Image (cartoon, rainbow, N blue to C red):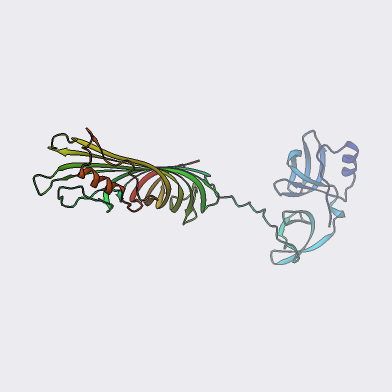
Amino acid sequence: MFKSRKFSGIVSAPLLFLICSLPAAATVIVQKNGDVISGKILEEKNDKYVFQSPYGTLQIAKTSISKLILDEKTIELKDVEFKNKKVKARLVSEENNTAVYLTEDGQTIRKEQAKPADAKPVEEPKTPEKTADRQKFLIGVTGSYGLSTFQQVDTGPGNGGPLPLEQSMHPNTLGFQATGHYALFSWLGVGAGFSFYRWSGGVTLIPQQSQQLAYDALTTNTSMAATGSLLFSLLGHLGAKDQAHDLRAELAFGAASNTANMEVTFKNPPQNFPSVASASGKLKSMALQAQVYYSYSFSSSLRLRLGLGYYRAFYTNIYDSGLQGNPPFPSGDKFKADFDRILALEGVSPQVISLQLGAEFGF
C-alpha cells in the first residue's frame, strides 16, 4: 500500500524545478475536503500553488491541502469497480475506512472498505456506575396522640369509700419523640432517641349514702425515656434522595423516668378533715418502643412521617408515700387507710398505643 507524505510548508525551489522538469509525471493533490486533483504544479507562491489540472489552471491554498503526491505514475494501477464496470485507478488515500482512487482521466472514486473479518469491534469505554446518592444522617421529630393504660382512679359507681385503681385503655395520651439515626446501609440504620408521654384525667365520685364522702380525683402520669434503636427500611430506601416513598420499622430499648401524681378534692368534708389531699411517686424503669411508619419526601432533605407507635414502661407500682392531706388526716382515719392500701397495690406495666405524625431531616 502506498503511503503518501504530508507537506506542511513550502515546496523548495529545487524540488519545484524537479517537478516541473518531469513532463511524463503528474502531481496529485488531496484536499482536506476529500477532493483529489491530478495535474502539474506551474508555480508555488507563499500561500498557494498555481496548478494545471484537466479542469484548467487552478489556484489552491496550501491550508486546504491534506496530501501532496509528487508522481502519480509511481502508484500502481488497480482494477476498481465503478459504475458497474472495472476501471484502472490509483489508490491515493485511505482514511476512516474509505479508500480514494484516481482514474487516469482524472475522476475520483470513493469506496468504503470492509473491515477485516478478524477485526475486533472497538468497545466504548464503560461509564462507571454511579453510586446512588444517599443521606447518612436522619433526624426526626414526631408528635403523637393515643390510648394508654396509666393508673387512674376507677370510674365505676361510688360507694362512699376510695375506689381501686384501674388500667383500662383511655384516650388523651399525648406524646413527643426526637430521634437521630446513621444509615449504615440502604435498609439499616442505628441511632438513639428521646420519648415523652403524658396522660391526665379526672373523675368525680359521689356516694350513694349522704353520710359518706364525695370527692374529685385528678391523676397525671408521665414517662420519659432515652433509648438506643435500630431502624429498618422495608423498601431499601433509607436516606435515598431519589426515592419519594419508604416504609420503615423501628425498635428501641432504654431507660425511662416515670412520675405519677394524684390530686383529691373533697366535697363538704367533715370538721377536722382535709379539704384536699395528694399522692405522688417517681421511679426509673426499663422502656420498650416499637413503631411502623410511612415516609414521603417533600424534597431531598425533608420528609413527612406518618405511623403507628407502641410504648411500654416496665413498672407495676409507682406511688410511694400514701395519701397526704391538707390539713393532715385525723389519726387512724379509715378513708386514708383504705386509700393508702389501694395505692400500694401492684398493677400492670403501663402501655401506650398512638398515631404519630412527624418530620424527618436528612443530610
Q: Is residue 331 above or below residue 126?
A: above
Please name whichever residue, 247 or 258, is drawn nearer the observer in this view of the structure.
Answer: 258
Count of residue discs: 0
Please name whichever residue, 233 or 126, is drawn nearer the observer in this view of the structure.
Answer: 233
Q: Going 14% across and 43% down the picture, which residue do you hit?
A: 213
Q: Is residue 301 left or right of residue 81?
A: left
**Residue 299 visible within the image:** no
Q: Going 85% across and 47% down the picture, which residue do you hit?
A: 70
Hey, which residue is sitting farthest left in the picture? 210
**Residue 362 visible within the image:** yes
Q: Is residue 66 left or right of residue 173?
A: right
Q: Tell me the quarter of the image containing the N terminus.
A: bottom right
Q: Is residue 47 left or right of residue 175?
A: right
Q: Percent x, y for residue 191?
A: 50, 46
Please name whichever residue, 24 or 345, is drawn nearer the observer in this view of the structure.
Answer: 345
Q: Percent x, y for residue 129?
A: 60, 52
Q: Percent x, y for residue 197?
A: 35, 44
Hey, which residue is sitting farthest front in the picture? 332
Q: Percent x, y for residue 85?
A: 72, 67
